[in-house]
Amino acid sequence: MKVQIDPQRCHGHGRCYTLAPALFGEDDEGYGQVIGDSAVPPDQEHAARLAASNCPERAIDLVEEA
């Protein structure tokens, strides 16, 4: 699984980096950004889904790898 944040939809509520700090950080203006190469380790998949489901703008996309 990989995570992405659509910067056009992100409004900077910060729920992603609050709920999944190993996967998301914040930029200088408080908007969410993906940490690293966007790959989600298996032990962080629940946190990624939790962050995505709690984003008010639905700015987080989860990409399932085949």
Image: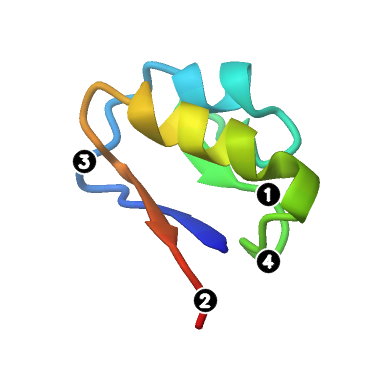
Q: Does dot 1 land on a helix, a strand or a loop?
A: loop
Q: Residues within 10 Å of mark 1 (few under 14, many from 20)?
A: some
Q: Mark number for residue 65?
A: 2
Tags 4 and 1 touching, CB below 8 Å: no
Q: Earlier in the sequence, mark 1 or mark 3?
A: 3
- Residue where numbered disc 3 is placed: 9
CA distance for labels 1 and 3: 18 Å
Q: Nearer the viewer, mark 4 or mark 2?
A: 2
On the rendered structure, is 8 left or right of 46?
left
- Residue where numbered disc 4 is placed: 37
Quarter holding residue 63: bottom left
Tags 4 and 2 touching, CB below 8 Å: no
CA distance for labels 2 and 3: 23 Å
Q: Nearer the viewer, mark 2 or mark 3?
A: 2
- Residue where numbered disc 1 is placed: 35
Which residue is rendered at x = 61% and y = 35% of the image? 46
Q: Is residue 57 above or below residue 43?
A: above
CA distance for labels 4 and 1: 7 Å
| Residue 26 visible in the shown view | no
